[in-house]
Image (tube, rainbow, N blue to C red):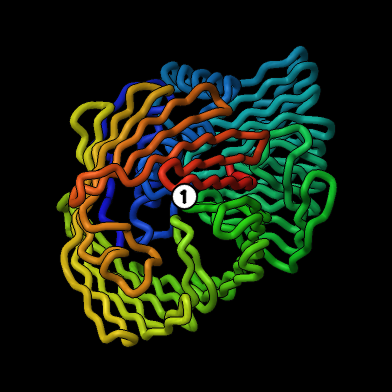
Amino acid sequence: MPLISLNLTKINRDRGEFMKQKKLIALVCLVATLFAIKGEAAYKSSTDTGADKLDILENMRRHARENALTPEQKNLLKVTGEMRQNLRRELDPTKPVPTAFEGEELTYDQNTGEFTAVGKVHIIQLDNHQFDSEMIRGNTIDQEIEIPEKSHMLQLTDNMPRVTLDGYHTFYNYGTKSGTMENASGKVDHQYVSGKRFEFYPDHVIIYDGTTTKCSAKVPDYHLSAEKITIWPNDRMILDNVKYWIKDKIVYTRDRVVQNLGPDAKGPDYPRMGYNSKSGVWLAQDFNYNLARNVNAKLHLFASSKQHVRPYADVTWENAHSTYILTYGYQEDNDNNWIKKEPSFIYRYGDRIGNLPLSYGLEYEIGRWSNNGITSTHSKYTLGLAHDMIVFDPSWYLFLGTSFSVTRESANDSTVRGWNVDTTLLKYFDDTWAAYLGYYYASSNKENALFAYGLRSYDRKMETGLSYRMDDKNRFVVGFAFDLTSRRLRDIDYYWFHDIHCSQLVLRYRAKRREWQAHWEFIPW
C-alpha cells in the first residue's frame, strides 16, 4: 500500500526549464508513489535500501528533458508573443487568425484572399503555427495553405499535439485545424515518427505506413512500424498491423497495439535481460493487450538459468478511482523474493479527500499463494492515508504517510495486523547531488510473515543514501539500511546507472550480502 502522495501545484521553483514543468512533474511524482491509485512509476529502481526515493528526481529530470522546447520552438513563441503585443485591437474568434508572411516574392489579392509566396517563404500564424518552404500558396479568407514541394511544419497550438515535421505535398486549414502531409518525418509530441501520409486533426494525428519510437538516435535502437498509427497526445497511441524492430531486425509482430502515453507510460514491450545470484542470467518480456476500453491483459514471460520459466498473466479493469486485477502465475518483488499466485484477485481504490492536502487508498487482495512447498489462502486488507508533499524550500521535500493492514494465512491460521508508518526527507542539492533519509515502521514484515514477498525485512528501519550524477550518461548511488531494533547496519547497496543510446545498464552490488545484480533494458524516454 502506498504511503506517499504528492501535489506539486504548491511548489514554487525557479531553476530554469528543469523546474518549470510543474504540472508534468506533479503527474510523474504522483504516479511514481501512488501506484494503488494510478499506474506504476515511469522509472522504478530495484532496492531494499530506499534508493527508489530518488526515482522522483530522476523522472523529473527525464521528463523535463523530454518536454524542453527546442531553440526553434522558443523562437516561434517569442515571435507570436511579439505579434500579440502589437495587435491594434482584440482578436475576434469569428475571423481568421492574424498571419505574418515573409518571402522573396509575395502576391496577395485582398478581394479573394488568395496569395502566393516564393523564395524562402516563412509563414507564422498567431496560434503558434509555422510553415517554411520555397513556395506556398493559399487563401487567407478560407484559412488554407498548400505547399506542393518540401516544407517544414511547426505546431505549438494550445490543446493540440506538438508537431515538428519535414515533408511534401502539404495542405492545412487553420480554421478547422486539420490537414495532410506526405512522406514526412520528425516528431509528434514525444514520439519520433515517419510515414508516407500524415493526417492532422485538432486532438490527434494519424500516420499511414509509418514508424514511431522515443529513441532520438539517427538509427534508433528500437522502433515500431505499422500500417496505421493514431496518436492521442498524453493519452494513448493505437497501432494496426505492428512490427517490433531492434535496429534493422524484426523481433515479432502484432495485429493491434494500444500503448499508453500518459504519465505512467512504460514504453513498448521490448525484452529485458540481467543477472542476479538467485535467478542467474535471466530474460523477461511483457506482452500487453487492450481487450476493451479500460480493460487490459498482460502476459509476462520470465526465463532464467537457475529458475527456468516463470510466467504470469493478469487482466486489469480500471473504472473511475477503482482498479480490479485478476492475476495468475509467478511474481517477483524488488528483493528477488518469489511467490506463485494461483490465482489472486486484487481490488484498489484511491482518491483525494475533498480540498484537503490528503489522499487515501484502499487495497484488498485474496488468493492462493505458494512458495517453498507452502500453499496458503492469503488475504490482506490495507487502508492508507498520505499527506501531499511538504516543501520547506525549493530543494527540501518531506513525505508523510501511514496505513493499517490485516494479513491472514490459512496455512498456519495466522493473523498479523497493525499500523505502518512511512516518512521520507528528500534533498535536491543541484543537478549533480541528491540525498534522502527515511524512517519506516511495518507491523507486517519478513520476520513475522509466512511469505517474504513484498515485505520489508524488519519492523523498524531507517534508510539513507546519496546520488551523484557524473554526467548525462552516468549516475552513482549508495544506499544504507539500518535496523533500529537491533541497532545495526543491515544493508549497503551500490548502484551504477549507465545510459547507452536509448537503453540503460544498471549494476547493483549488495555489499552486506555479497551479491551482484545487473539488468539491461530499453528505456521509454
Q: Position of residue 519 (x, y in %)?
A: 60, 47
| Left or right, residue 330 beside residue 183 | left
Amino acid marked by disc 1: Ser
How many neighbours does mark 1 have within 10 angstroms: few (below 14), some (14-19), or many (20 or more)? some
Q: Position of residue 221 (x, y in %)?
A: 73, 41
Residue lying at the far top in this picture: please name it: 104
| Residue 387 visible, this angle | no
246 or 285, which is in the foreground? 285
Q: Residue at x 24, y 30 (%)?
A: 396
Q: Position of residue 457 (x, y in %)?
A: 32, 57
Q: Quadrant of residue 26?
A: top left
| Left or right, residue 485 beside residue 168 | left
| Residue 68 visible, this angle | yes
| Left or right, residue 170 beside residue 269 | right
Q: Residue at x 53, y 72 (%)?
A: 330
Q: Is residue 69 above or below residue 412?
A: above
Query: Tag 1, which secondary structure?
Result: loop
Quadrant occupied by the C terminus: top right
Q: Residue at x 64, y 57 (%)?
A: 282
511 or 493, which is in the foreground? 511
Q: Quadrant of residue 255?
A: bottom right
Quadrant occupied by the N terminus: bottom left
76 or 248, which is in the foreground? 248
Q: Position of residue 177 (x, y in %)?
A: 59, 44
User: Which residue matches tag 1?
Assistant: 46
Query: So how many labels did they put on this image?
Result: 1
Q: Residue at x 79, y 16 (%)?
A: 119
Q: Is residue 78 above or below residue 286?
A: above
Q: Is residue 215 above or below residue 135?
A: below
